[in-house]
Amino acid sequence: MRIITGEARYRKLKTPKGRNLRPTSDIVKEGLFNIIGNGIRGARFLDIFAGTGNVGIEAISRGAERADFLELSRGHIAVIRDNLRTCGFAGRAGVHGGKAEQLLAMLASADIKYDYIYADPPYDYEEYGTLLEQISELGLLNEGGSLFLETGRRTVLPDEAGDFAVVRKYRYGNTVLTLYRRATQKR
């Protein structure tokens, strides 16, 4: 696993041992950042269920001002921190350990907002509607921001939840990126 482009181009990232991690592939990452385009420059990026930090670190490498990483596994948190140090991005990132629901509330209480939110929960995750509603209620996404969910192709997601609505789905093999925006700003 590596960083595709930007400041940390071609840097290899560590991956924890075990089967409970499914890092985002280069094809999906490239697709995500092609969708975002130059909007990543100077942006704030939130990587939920961060795993190795692969996606958020790519965001920083491509010019994001800052990325925050939310991860439950202590082993994965250590890997994210190592990967940030390897790329020289530790000062531009926050790594938070615990359950996503609690960490999202913590970020909201600190009045932190993001331009892009990316969530890649385990494929057996079932609380997508609840997650979208919580992000909506907490006001974590800046006006005009985008929220992406990475899922398996068989995962059924709500068309609307909270004030979010599906704008488009992008399929990459067995992986689907679903783009949500506020229902009032679907374009």
Image (cartoon, grey):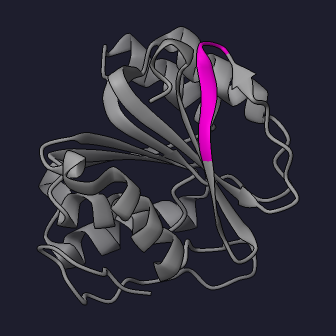
Q: Position of residue 113 (x, y in %)?
A: 32, 23
Magenta highlight on residue 167: yes
- Who's the residue at 25% across and 87% down the image? 11
Q: Is residue 84 left or right of residue 75?
A: left
Q: Nearer the viewer, residue 38 or 98?
A: 38
Viewport quadrant of the C terminus:
top left
Q: Residue 79, can we see it?
A: no
Q: Nearer the viewer, residue 101 or 171?
A: 171
- Who's the residue at 56% across and 17% down the image? 183
- Who's the residue at 55% across and 59% down the image? 74
- Who's the residue at 51% across and 56% down the image? 50
Q: Quadrant of residue 7?
A: bottom left
Q: Position of residue 65 (x, y in %)?
A: 14, 46
Q: Position of residue 185 (x, y in %)?
A: 45, 19
Q: Which residues are magenta?
A: 162-168
Magenta highlight on residue 114: no
Q: Nearer the viewer, residue 122 or 147?
A: 147
Q: Position of residue 99 (x, y in %)?
A: 63, 37
Farthest residue toward the front?
Answer: 187
Q: Residue 186, can we see it?
A: yes
Q: Is residue 103 above or below residue 30?
A: above
Q: Is residue 45 left or right of residue 152?
A: left
Q: Is residue 144 left or right of residue 18?
A: left
Q: Is residue 44 above or below residue 129?
A: below
Q: Look at the magenta stretch and give its main secondary structure.
A: strand
